Amino acid sequence: MPSIQIGTLAELPDGTGRAFTVEGRRLAVFRVGDELYAIDDTCSHAEASLSAGEFDPDELCVECPLHGSSFDVRTGVPRTLPAFEPVAAYRIFHDGELIFVEYPE
Ligand code: FES
């Protein structure tokens, strides 16, 4: 699977999340220290941007801003209703300052 550079650590302060666009698809990317997590940005329940939700770096989950489902940022699996389908999760890493995601061709 190819690795695509999506941004830099400077664009993603520790303990926060934001959206990056990869090959026309929006990913929600989160950072806790040196660890990075990437899931699809669009909620599996309706049209909402998960990167706009509240990120809890201790619980490693993000709350959907529309109806409040909490998604595990490691797996994309919702922990609370109303969403019950997972969103895709991607392998993500950094090499120095550069952030890469493994993205299917
Ligand atoms: S749109 Fe995300 S929980 Fe409804």
Image (spheres, rainbow, N blue to C red):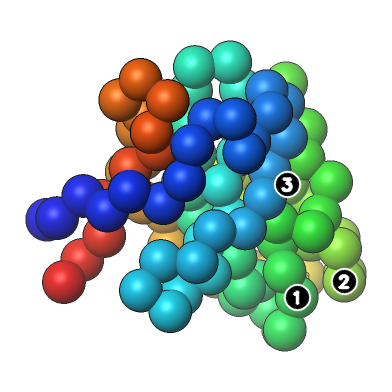
Distance from disc 2 to disc 3, alpha carbons, whole Å, reads: 12 Å
Q: Which residue is mark 2?
A: 66
Distance from disc 3 to disc 1, alpha carbons, whole Å, reads: 12 Å
Task: Tell me the quarter of the image containing the N terminus.
Answer: bottom left
Asked if ligand 1 lies within 8 A of label 2, the reply is yes
Position of 53 with respect to 33 (left or right) is right
Residue, far bottom: 47
What's the amino acid at mark 2? Leu
What's the amino acid at mark 3? Val
Total count of labels: 3
- 65 versus 17 height, above or below: below
Q: Are marks 1 and 2 in contact (CB under 8 Å)?
A: yes
Look at 43% across and 79% down and name the residue there. Answer: 24
User: Which class describes the residues within 10 Å of circle 1: few (<14), some (14-19), or many (20+)?
Assistant: some
Q: Are marks 2 and 3 in contact (CB under 8 Å)?
A: no
- 38 versus 24 height, above or below: above
Q: On residue 48, which mark appears? A: 1
Asked if ligand 1 lies within 8 A of label 1, the reply is yes
Distance from disc 1 to disc 2, alpha carbons, whole Å, reads: 6 Å
Q: Which residue is mark 3?
A: 62
- Earlier in the chain: of badge 3 and badge 1, it is 1
Camera-side residue of 48 and 12: 12
Q: Is residue 74 visible?
A: no
Task: Give coordinates of residue 69: x percent, y percent.
Answer: 78, 59
Q: Secondary structure at mark 2?
A: loop
Task: Give coordinates of residue 100: x percent, y percent.
Answer: 33, 42
Q: Quadrant of ligand 1?
A: bottom right
- Earlier in the chain: of badge 1 and badge 2, it is 1
